[in-house]
Image (cartoon, helix red, strand yellow):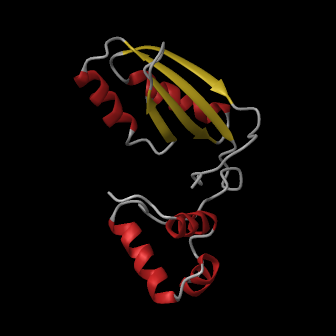
């Protein structure tokens, strides 16, 4: 994969701020005419640099104000155990992020919930029913200091 040049980085920065920007506005911001700008965007998509476009929804405004970070320790770290866990949690819409970790814990999850009782239901009805979990440690976010999905390009 070839390296990104300065114009590619400007395109990515602009699209991360507003992916609904018109091609004309984008071209003006990065100093190109519309056709070359469009070609570059298409190439970034084809190369997998741009993976998708989406709308960001405020979790509080849709009734999901609670964010919980969950550290999971598995009984064993064999490949089939890791795969079974990953497959199960990938189906749960409450889980927004899941990372396989180094250190004392095997996984770190970010889960959203409407309230404490909703989180308790998630914990009891889904997470604790998975085989192979040795421990679950939940930490509740009191407030969000920073949130960004824009990568520093």
Note whether 39 is above or below 77 in the view shown: below
Residue at 47 percent across and 17 percent down: it is 105
Find the residue positioned furthest to the left: 80
Marks counted in the figure total 0
Q: Quadrant of residue 42?
A: bottom left
Residue at 54 percent across and 65 percent down: it is 6
Residue at 34 percent across and 28 percent down: it is 85
Q: Quadrant of the N terminus?
A: bottom left
Between residue 90 and residue 120, name the one nearer to us.
90
Q: Is residue 110 left or right of residue 83?
A: right
Between residue 29 and residue 70, name the one nearer to us.
29
Location of residue 110 in the rendering, given as x and y in whole percent from the top left corner = 55, 35
Note whether 101 is above or below 152 in the view shown: above
Location of residue 58 in the rendering, given as x and y in whole percent from the top left corner = 67, 55
Location of residue 27 in the rendering, given as x and y in whole percent from the top left corner = 57, 82
Location of residue 95 in the rendering, given as x and y in whole percent from the top left corner = 49, 39
Q: Quadrant of the C terminus?
A: bottom right
Q: Quadrant of residue 15?
A: bottom right
Q: Is residue 66 left or right of residue 54?
A: right
Between residue 80 and residue 20, name the one nearer to us.
20
Q: Is residue 3 left or right of residue 123?
A: left
Residue at 62 percent across and 32 percent down: it is 68
């Amino acid at each position: 994969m070839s390296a990104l040049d300065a114009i590619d980085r400007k395109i990515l920065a602009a699209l991360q701020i507003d992916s609904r920007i018109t091609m004309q506005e984008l071209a003006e911001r990065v100093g190109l005419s519309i056709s070359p700008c469009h070609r570059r965007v298409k190439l970034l998509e084809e190369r997998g640099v741009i993976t998708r476009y989406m709308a960001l929804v405020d979790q509080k405004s849709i009734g999901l104000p609670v964010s919980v970070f969950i550290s999971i320790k598995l009984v064993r770290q064999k490949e089939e155990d890791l795969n079974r866990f990953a497959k199960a949690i990938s189906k749960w819409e409450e889980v927004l992020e899941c990372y396989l970790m180094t250190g004392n814990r095997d996984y770190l999850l970010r889960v959203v919930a409407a309230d404490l009782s909703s989180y308790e239901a998630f914990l009891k009805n889904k997470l604790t029913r998975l085989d192979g979990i040795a421990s679950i440690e939940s930490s509740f976010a009191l407030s969000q200091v920073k949130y960004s999905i824009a990568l520093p390009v």
